[in-house]
Amino acid sequence: MKLFPILGGIHPEYRKELTSEKAIVALPVPKTLYLPLQQHMGAPANTTVDAGDLVKKGQLLAKAQGAISAALHAPTSGRIAAITEMTAPHPSGLPVLTIMLDSDGKDEWAEPMPAIDDPFAASPAEIKARVAEAGIVGMGGATFPSAVKLGLGGQHKLEILLLNGAECEPYLTCDDRVMREFAAQVVDGARIMAHALGAPKVIIAVEDNKPQAVDSLKAEAAKTPNVEVVGVPVQYPMGAERHLTQAVTGRETPARKLTADVGVVVHNVATARAVHQAVRLGRPLVSRVVTVSGGAVAEPKNIEVPLGTRVSELLDFCGGISKEARRIISGGPMMGQPLPSLDVAVVKGTSGILALTQGETNEHASSPCIRCGSCVTYCPCGLVPVEMASYIRNDKLDLAAKIGVQDCVSCGSCSYICPSHIPLVHYFNYAKGKIAALDRERRKNEQTKALVEAHNARLERQAQAKREAAAKAKAAKEAAEAAAAAPQANQQAQPNSAGGANA
Amino acid sequence: MLLDVGSLAVMGVTLGAVLGTAAKLLAVPVNPIEEELQNLLPGSQCGQCGFVGCAQYAAALAKGDTPITLCAPGGKATIEALAKRLGVHADADAHEEVGPRVAFINEDLCIGCLRCIGECGSDAIVGAPKQLHTVIADACHACSKCFKICPTEAIEMRPIPQTIAAWHWQKPGEHSAH
Ligand code: SF4
Ligand code: SF4
């Protein structure tokens, strides 16, 4: 298959060999699981259980609320110990409402949802409903509710479901292992999603550094028409939606548009596996494969982890972390987020937990820009990081926006390559968040203004109505008085005229 | 006769033109900047800035003898807009302490007197006489007028807790290590 070049991008040290040959092992169910109600983009889920309730594995704990949200299910059987606020697995460390589930040690499944035996005979709506019911979200880390994304077929004419197996972040091998060990499930899930989307073709894109994954997928794909497996060059950030679409199809997605606008929808390989399980087995999303790696981890592993497991327990399962651990990250080293504590839970979007040593982190004191232009050369989005950062440093967010800071995908290539170690991507993350916050505030102020104006207009109308009523009453009163006076006048007139006549 | 009419007409036109130009040239200027600034303020006349209303605050701002951080309901977006228009540096940090807030009516204390409804400039409170009143959080702009008028102190101005969705990274320090 002919591929297309993508702009910029870097070749970081991958270090995937730490875990790439480690087959997925299951984590014994921890004593207590901690399940945040917000593990996805959109509105938090709404609890359907109370403290003290006994639940079975796979039972619904919280349902989706609003258009963009995702349901949450029990990852094991046991008793709901509490529903309380706990630290979120998010760099903000803000509290999030969390369900605490004490395991009963039996790990007993609830009655599964009925399997859909022939998903290709089922309607797209039925598949979508099942994916929503199973609480599936984008498992590459974006955590966008998958059912909503499957709905794109309704509004766009789609040609290709592009399954993302690029896994371009260093260290992570969870997708690689899923593709190798569960190729049949991945291909089946992808075909089901393509059916739901109305996309006639599936292309599975895998970076060339995962030949075994390509082989197992190809063996599966050979059994069905219209599924193609392609190897793509090893180049970070190949796994970014727009870049993968560009590389595989040559179609460029315009700024602020979706890949769906060019006929392509991108889903992650682990999401495809979850869809397979939900549709064919009636099982909701209650666990995921996580890569635990990094130079500070005693025994790096790929682990199938029940959602809600604390990071500390996961690290213990890998022999603990050494004293050299400098940063603990959720996700990959390029785009992952530092964790506020080791007590936070593994959630649906946790692809990796990395404990990195000083030598593995890109931590250096920054020095002034030497105007080398490397960041401009390597930015895969064609942006000018050096200029954007200087605007942002001087609080000129509107100028930064004008030259496209909101199109930055936060890939971190510029920060990685910068010889002066300027925290470029940090500037952009700050600017994007701040611009969005100011926009929200501006919208709220506009709304307030409209409300105040409507309120004043109403008061004015009421006052006007009162004035009119008063005027009417006055007019009526005068008319009545006039009417009352008129006969008098007549009477008065008569003597007058009489007088006149007399005179 | 025709001459009279003609001369009067000419005089009328000339004088009219003179007066018109004079009016334009000698007009007492309604400071346009004032109007522009007023448009940037929420317009709820809450008086939290210490002035009688938004127009008066705008006038003071135009003169440049008052800080731009006084509008509590407008928040940081308003401060930035004012700073941009006036070409001064926004010291939004001084404002931060208050944070976004929303009125909340304590149901046990509300006697349904309707006073808060009358006071709210953005129609954010609903309720009927002698019935519980409640605040529509989305429409409340935290002007605190209801809070001040409630006879039973049933109204609190509560801080809006920060959410993960609204959170963002802080600006990197000048020499921060990344
Ligand atoms: S982080 Fe943003 S600006 Fe930097 S290279 Fe990536 S897309 Fe370009
Ligand atoms: S890579 Fe760093 S030093 Fe080079 S131009 Fe960009 S910001 Fe400046």
Image (cartoon, coloured by chain):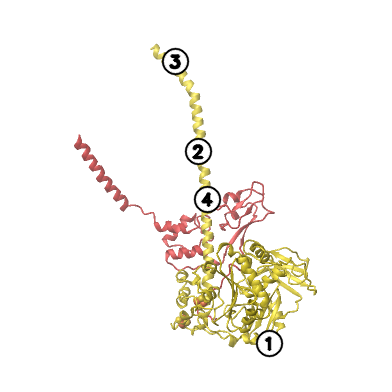
Chain colours: A yellow, B red
Mark 2 residue element: helix
Residue A38 seen in render = yes
Residue situated furthest top in the rendering: A502
Q: CA distance from mark 1 to mark 3?
A: 124 Å
Chain identity of mark 3: A
Select label 2 or label 3 by which is in front.
2
Q: Residue at x 51, y 49 (%)?
A: A456
Indicate the amino acid at tag 3. Answer: Pro
Q: CA distance from mark 1 to mark 4?
A: 65 Å
Residue at numbered disc 4: A454
Crowding near pointer 3: few (<14 within 10 Å), some, many (20+)? few
Residue A253, x across and y down, in percent:
50, 70
Residue at numbered disc 2: A468
Residue at numbered disc 1: A298
Q: Earlier in the sequence, mark 2 or mark 1?
A: 1
Indicate the amino acid at tag 4. Answer: Ala
Q: Residue at x 48, y 21 (%)?
A: A488
Q: Earlier in the sequence, mark 2 or mark 4?
A: 4
| Whether residue A386 is situated above or below residue B114 in the rendered picture | below
Indicate the amino acid at tag 2. Answer: Glu
Q: Earlier in the sequence, mark 2 or mark 3?
A: 2
Residue A312, x across and y down, in percent:
70, 80
Select label 4 or label 3 by which is in front.
4
Q: Earlier in the sequence, mark 4 or mark 3?
A: 4
Asked if marks 2 and 1 fall on the same chain, the answer is yes
B91 horizontally vs A345: left or right = left
Q: CA distance from mark 2 to mark 4?
A: 20 Å
Residue A270, x across and y down, in percent:
65, 75
Residue at numbered disc 3: A495
Front one among A429 and A470: A429
- Residue contact at pointers 2 and 4, CB within 8 angstroms: no
